[in-house]
Image (cartoon, grey):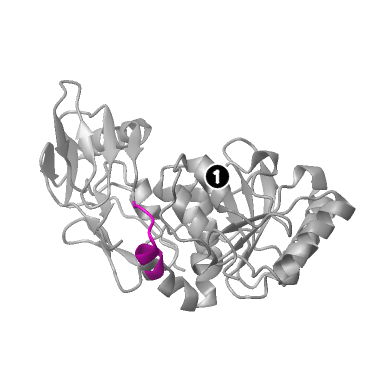
Amino acid sequence: MRIFKESVDRKRLSIINDMPISIDIRQSSPGRVRFKNGSTSQIGCLGCINPRCMSFSEQEIECDYVSSFPCDKSIGVCPVDALSWDIVIDAPTIDICKCISCGICVSRCPIGAMYFSEQGEVHINSNTGYTEKNKIPDSSVKDIHLSQIKQLIKIPHTGILLNASDTLFERVYKKPLGIDSKYHNFIGRNLLIALGCKCSMRRIGDVYTRMDAIYLSSTGTFGAIEIEFGRDTLEAVRGILDDIAVLHTRYGIHRNNNKAMVICLQLPNERQGYWQVVKDIKSVEKIKIGTVTVGGLMFLLWNGCTLKPENDLYYLDYDNMDLRNILSKETGVAEIGLSKRKLGIMEPMK
């Protein structure tokens, strides 16, 4: 995973002629901006300085709830290196072969220029309407550009990035099922950041800090994270207990203030020991470990939600393995367009 290094030496910069009041995000077409006079338009990529679609801020990757946590400093938004910057057109380009359609970059575009096709592929609108391309921009143009980006981030973005379906998830999940393990933690961390959390991932090769990551939600909930893409999820839940102990002894974080979670690609099968162990830990230690899938996190993101793990919302165990009901309530989607048990995303496959 490379550390994205942005250069502000642009050949041109876009300035919006009229600041919109809202942006409607939709599948199959670029976002539509609405102006005060009631008119609407689609605006293409602005070629942002320090583009949010490509890089996180240092604050987003540093969970300051734990001081001196040895976190990985990579700030690339795309967890699989599918995004690169084209210096000729001053805009990002997407390697469709690498892209896993997580939607992180799409969700962070301040103007809605990035969008999903019906097939779940990410596209970038290059329409230059309602903007001016300033060649060889001076400092005043850069200041205006940066100010406009800050305003756009605060403007309401409404709508759904991508509609879930069996066909869509079958296509999306093909890549993560066989992806190199070096990307696993990046996928988990970057999804959590996109869902409104600060999230620090341990440095690769750091054997002293064994937990995969720690997070702090927008509402102040803290927890350790274990990320498991394979079938050995039992090891992940055992790892959570180790994480809780380490955070208590080294950083003084009481277990009651640690809403630890396991992020898995697929929910463990019903007869796997994972579910009983999670229940036993709750019964004996009074600790409720949350469980959520990568697909579940993507679904939250596609529907414009943040992760809110308060009140042990994502606690599942042997008596209740249903993630679908939780996600339905969180997103307001009454009927999720994914068949029961499909790919183990909402319920165990068997």
Residue 280 relative to residue 58: left or right:
right
Q: Residues within 10 Å of mark 1 (few under 14, many from 20)?
A: many
Furthest toward the top, the residue is 37
- Residue drawn at (15%, 36%), measured in percent from left and top? 41
Where's residue 298, x and y in %? 46, 55
The C terminus lies in quadrant? bottom right
In the rendered image, residue 206, in percent from the top left (x then y), is placed at 67, 69
Residue 184, located in which quarter of the rendered image? bottom right
Answer whether residue 163 is visible to the viewer in this image.
yes
**Residue name at image x 31 percent, y 54 percent:** 7
Q: Is residue 245 visible?
A: no
| Amino acid carrying mark 1 in the image | Leu
Residue 230 x, y percent position in the rendering: 60, 75
Location of residue 6 (image quadrant): bottom left
Q: Is residue 185 above or below residue 31?
A: below
The magenta-colored residue range is: 162-170
The residue at 16%/61% (across/down) is 88
Q: Is residue 52 magenta?
A: no
Q: Is residue 49 above or below residue 344?
A: above
Q: Which residue is mark 1?
A: 307
